Image (tube, helix red, strand yellow):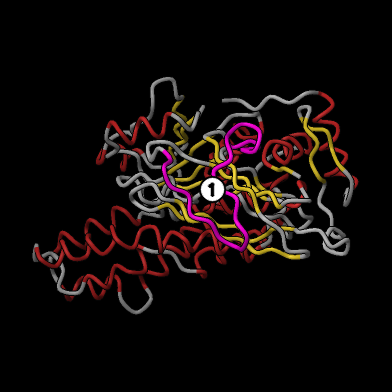
């Protein structure tokens, strides 16, 4: 589902991105959007921020937000299309306060919401549940909704990150198909694919194989577990050795030229206007760095990038707990907690990649240009593709 924009829309957003527009409106696809503005609150209008959406198993969605300025009612619109739900969907609630509960939506669909305060149509926000609701790919999520340092927002429904899609059932595939993904980029190695199987993707979705090494972690993990020897397992994984595996792997994502090319290939697909889903096995290390590159490239701050990176611990907790319990009951590991550094993510892993960028290139911008080989045009297209005003 490739993004279509008019020439005027593109020029307007280019002006905002390059000239740092801070007020007024931009005409995008025939619709007036507010450019990022800091003075709405000074004029007493209601401005919404910090919106979040959580969906329950029955499809009930709880929306929360923060309102500043004059108190007013908030109208909630829902749509299965990520662009302007207020225009593409329907009104589902009107509330006074900072939360709303929406019921009666089809749980087989992915829903996007626009929250619009009365009296200030430009003070609203678009929000969606971050997770995609795929039980057999629990770390599948949307990277949209994050704010950049200059006040723009990463669009929902354009780029998705995930763990392996090898176990998806028909219902999950049908839900995935509704996202309109053009390309599914698989970052797993040939070893992982041959061992566990190819990703399941909807008909018509292109598969891009962009294998990136995990630093031998997957093979090492299988070898250590298969030994069934608690002493060997503690020697191999204890005393910071497990953590070091992922620190080294993250450094290699930056230092290895062949791996940089794979990350660059995914970025070019997104910049070219494709809706992309990328994944590795757990959707946390290679996928985590891929996401960090994208969000950093469009101007999301480091703290927010790290916050998104660490969310893998939340989305993978249940499946990781089951894995550890299964290993213990099967007699394969007496102390499966040794696996915690490998099953989850830590800030130091992501920091290792960023530190390698600084060491090797001096700045993230130089890494994008010299390390990934992205020219100014491609980087501008990436911002146009992913940012909304």
Give the image quarter of residue 351.
bottom right
Q: Is residue 92 left or right of residue 322?
A: right
How many numbered marks appear?
A: 1
Where is mark 1, residue-wise?
128
Query: Above or below — where is 323 with respect to 57?
Result: below
Query: Above or below — where is 182 with respect to 312?
Result: above
Task: Check residue 92 for magenta coloring.
Answer: yes
Q: Quadrant of the C terminus?
A: top right
Q: Nearer the viewer, residue 209 or 111?
A: 111
Residue at 88%, 39% (x, y): give it: 15
Q: Is residue 141 left or right of residue 282?
A: right
Q: Is residue 305 left or right of residue 109?
A: right
Q: Is residue 366 visible?
A: no
Give the image quarter of residue 271.
top right
- Return the x and y of residue 71 as percentages of the image width and height: 73, 63
Residue at the bottom extreme, as displayed: 239
- Return the x and y of residue 129 as percentages of the image width and height: 49, 50
Q: Nearer the viewer, residue 128 or 207?
A: 128
Q: Nearer the viewer, residue 175 or 228?
A: 175
Query: Above or below — where is 29 with respect to 108?
Result: above
Please rate how many residues cluster around mark 1, counting C-alpha atoms within 10 Å: few if below 14, some from 14 to 19, many from 20.
Answer: many
Residue at 46%, 33% (x, y): give it: 184
Element class at badge 1 = loop
Segment colored magenta: 82-105
Task: Check residue 323 for magenta coloring.
Answer: no
């Amino acid at each position: 589902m490739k993004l279509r924009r008019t020439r005027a829309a593109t020029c307007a957003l280019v002006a905002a991105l390059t000239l740092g527009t801070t007020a007024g409106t931009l005409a995008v696809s025939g619709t007036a959007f507010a450019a990022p503005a800091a003075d709405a609150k000074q004029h007493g209008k209601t401005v919404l921020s910090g919106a979040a959406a959580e969906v329950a198993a029955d499809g009930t969605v709880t929306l929360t937000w923060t309102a500043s300025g004059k108190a007013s009612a908030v109208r909630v619109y829902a749509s299965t299309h990520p662009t302007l739900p207020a225009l593409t969907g329907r009104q589902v609630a009107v509330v006074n306060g900072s939360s709303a509960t929406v019921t009666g939506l089809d749980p087989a669909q992915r829903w996007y919401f626009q929250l619009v305060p009365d009296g200030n149509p430009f003070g609203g926000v678009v929000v969606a549940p971050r997770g995609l609701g795929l039980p057999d790919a629990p770390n599948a999520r949307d990277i949209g909704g994050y704010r950049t340092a200059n006040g723009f927002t990463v669009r929902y429904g354009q780029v998705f990150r995930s763990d392996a899609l090898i176990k998806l059932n028909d219902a999950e595939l049908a839900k995935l198909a509704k996202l309109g993904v053009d390309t599914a980029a698989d970052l797993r190695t040939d070893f992982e694919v041959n061992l566990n199987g190819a990703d399941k993707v909807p008909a018509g979705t292109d598969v891009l194989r962009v294998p990136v090494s995990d630093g031998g972690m997957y093979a090492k993990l299988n070898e250590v577990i298969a030994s069934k020897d608690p002493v060997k397992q503690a020697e191999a994984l204890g005393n910071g050795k497990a953590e070091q595996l992922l620190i080294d792997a993250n450094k290699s994502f930056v230092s290895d030229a062949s791996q940089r090319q794979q990350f660059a290939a995914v970025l070019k697909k997104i910049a070219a206007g494709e809706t992309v889903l990328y994944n590795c096995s757990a959707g946390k290390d290679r996928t985590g760095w891929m996401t960090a590159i994208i969000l950093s490239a469009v101007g999301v701050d480091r703290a927010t990038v790290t916050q998104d990176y660490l969310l893998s611990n939340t989305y993978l907790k249940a499946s990781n707990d089951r894995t550890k319990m299964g290993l213990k009951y099967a007699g394969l590991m007496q102390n499966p907690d040794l696996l915690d550094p490998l099953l989850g993510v830590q800030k130091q892993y992501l920091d290792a990649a960023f530190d390698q960028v600084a060491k090797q290139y001096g700045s993230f911008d130089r890494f994008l240009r010299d390390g990934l080989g992205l020219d100014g045009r491609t980087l501008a297209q990436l911002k146009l593709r992913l940012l909304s005003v």
